Amino acid sequence: MKVAVLGSGSAGNSVLVCAGETRILIDAGFSARSLADRLDRLDISADSITGIVVTHDHGDHTRGMGIFARRHGTPLHLTDRTREACAKLLTGDEEVLEYRPGVAFSIRNLRIDSFYTVHDAADPVGISVVDERSGLRVGVATDLGRPTAQIRHALSGCDLLVLEANHDDVMLRTGPYPAAVKQRIASSHGHLSNRAAARLALELMHPRLAGVVLAHLSRECNRPFLAERVVGDALRKAGWKGHLEVATQERPTELLDVEELRYRAGPIQLTLL
């Protein structure tokens, strides 16, 4: 199982998950051309994408989904309410498969588990993806607002986490946004701060957790080194020795081999509990 964040931030979000010949995108928040270019950097053909799973209707998660789906014949997986909210992006020429939050479905050998998140969108969900062959699990949770018991449960047991670390509290408070925007970002329906991401990462830490990729950083109210320091310090103090990196808006991460990350961290991680 291999994972790459194609890019993440307020201008676009997309995560690639590969297991054998099955290749899916979680969200398609860049233009269709940019998505194809980002995949090409990883030596992945856009025509080989098996499906796109959309988490919610905001443009930074849906921008290129319609054109990409039509251009490459890629099925779109949406909830009913997200499909309604994204009607302007669809022409009816796409293959659209609706899913229900909380009800698992499969894309070939990948099982997709969705769970409700708290965010100001029509029908926001987070996603965990399980490779039925290896049992490896990847969790993708951005645009969280606040972590709930359901979210914690859904993300427990992941081998790799793509986790939101949107803003630094001080930078948000003193930053350029209007007061209403600051209030929205910091609210329970907005985004996780670095400190909130660190707390959630600690709660989700377990012996099999081999990697954490921090995502959806604000350009105005965060810096990669701040997010990595806050979350990394919390995890290291708790004894975690896995892989930590920060996804950027401009370019994809490397294609991370989850099994390899587990192999590297395995003997040390077993001492956590």
Image (cartoon, rainbow, N blue to C red):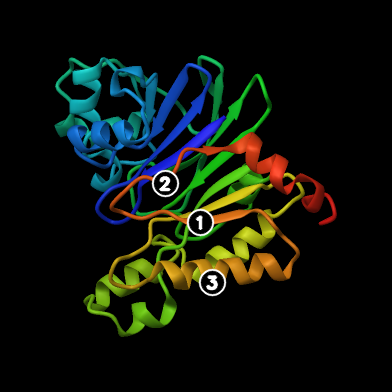
Given the image, on which type of amino acid does mark 2 rest? Thr
SS at mark 1?
strand
Q: Nearer the viewer, residue 154 or 68?
A: 68
Q: In which quarter of the image is residue 36?
A: top left
For disc 1, the neighbor class at 10 Å (few under 14, some 14 to 19, many from 20) is: some
Judging depth in this view, the residue of 6 and 179 nearest the camera is 6
Q: Can you identify the residue that label 2 sits on?
A: 253
Circle 3 sits in a helix, a strand or a loop, which is it?
A: helix
Residue toward you, 261 or 30: 261
Label 1 close to label 2 by CB (< 8 Å): yes
Quadrant of the rendered image containing residue 64: top left
Q: Is mark 2 on a helix, strand or loop?
A: loop
Residue drawn at the location 31% of the way across and 85% of the way down: 174
Residue under the point 74% across and 51% down: 206
Q: Name the residue under label 1.
A: 245
The residue at which mark 3 appears reads as: 229
Q: Position of residue 222 (x, y in %)?
A: 37, 71
Q: CA separation, marks 3 and 2?
A: 18 Å
Q: How far apart are marks 3 and 1 (CA)?
A: 10 Å
Specify which label sits upstream in the sequence, 3 or 1: 3
Residue 181 x, y percent position in the rendering: 27, 70
Disc 3 crowd rating (10 Å Cα; few below 14, some 14-19, many 20+) is few
User: Which label number is shown at residue 165?
Assistant: none
Residue 205 versus residue 137 in the image, above or below? below
